Image (spheres, rainbow, N blue to C red):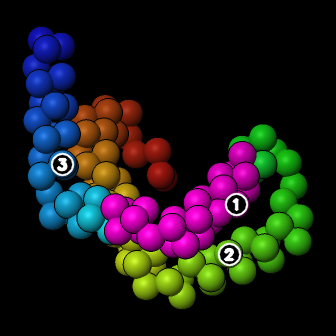
């Protein structure tokens, strides 16, 4: 029985890889990485984002200076057309994964009730 779950999961993985959303995301990611300046800018953005997430998850306070630096970094990458398009494609892909997660979790939500209240 468990094999059926894994087969379905691999089918879903294949469908995601073949989706328009993933194809667009991968194309934009490759374009950003092919441009050395854009790649460095995007990596810097990711580093700032990761550091803030790690601080937040460990319960550390995020300083006003860190918030301002993050805002400047976001504003900078949003001005770069390819990075901005990549971020939009990431957001669409994230929404798709979230919707798929809701479908997958539906049996447990029906069993235990909605956690969201």
Q: CA distance from mark 3 to mark 2?
A: 30 Å
Q: Is residue 73 left or right of residue 107?
A: right
SS state under label 2: helix
- Residue 76, above or below 15: below
Q: CA distance from mark 3 to mark 1?
A: 28 Å
Residue 65 part of the magenta-drawn span? no
**Which residue is the site of mark 2?**
73
Q: Is residue 44 left or right of residue 12?
A: right
Classed neighbour count for the residue bearing mark 2: other residues with Cα under 10 Å, few (<14), some (14–19), many (≥20)? some
- Residue 65, above or below 81: above
53 and 117: which one is in front?
Answer: 53
How many marks overall?
3
Can I make out residue 8 in this image?
yes
- Residue 48 is marked as 1
Q: Are marks 1 and 2 in contact (CB under 8 Å)?
A: yes
111 and 73: which one is in front?
Answer: 73
23 and 109: which one is in front?
Answer: 23
**Which residue is the site of mark 3?**
17
Residue 37 part of the magenta-drawn span? yes
Classed neighbour count for the residue bearing mark 3: other residues with Cα under 10 Å, few (<14), some (14–19), many (≥20)? few
What residue lies at 70% left-to-right and 60% top-to-bottom?
48
Q: CA distance from mark 1 to mark 2?
A: 8 Å
What residue lies at 59% left-to-right and 70% top-to-bottom?
41
What residue lies at 40% left-to-right and 65% top-to-bottom?
34
Classed neighbour count for the residue bearing mark 1: other residues with Cα under 10 Å, few (<14), some (14–19), many (≥20)? some
Residue 45, position in %: x, y?
62, 65
The stretch in magenta equals: 29-54
């Amino acid at each position: 029985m468990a094999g059926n779950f894994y087969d379905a999961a691999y089918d879903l993985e294949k469908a995601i890889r073949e989706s328009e959303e993933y194809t667009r995301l991968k194309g934009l990611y490759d374009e950003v990485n092919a441009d050395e300046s854009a790649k460095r800018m995007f990596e810097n953005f990711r580093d700032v984002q990761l550091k803030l997430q790690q601080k937040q998850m460990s319960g550390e306070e995020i300083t006003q200076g860190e918030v301002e630096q993050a805002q400047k970094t976001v504003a900078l990458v949003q001005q770069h057309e390819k990075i901005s398009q990549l971020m939009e494609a990431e957001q669409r892909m994230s929404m798709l994964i979230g919707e798929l997660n809701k479908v997958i979790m539906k049996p447990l939500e029906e069993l235990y009730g909605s956690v969201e209240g």
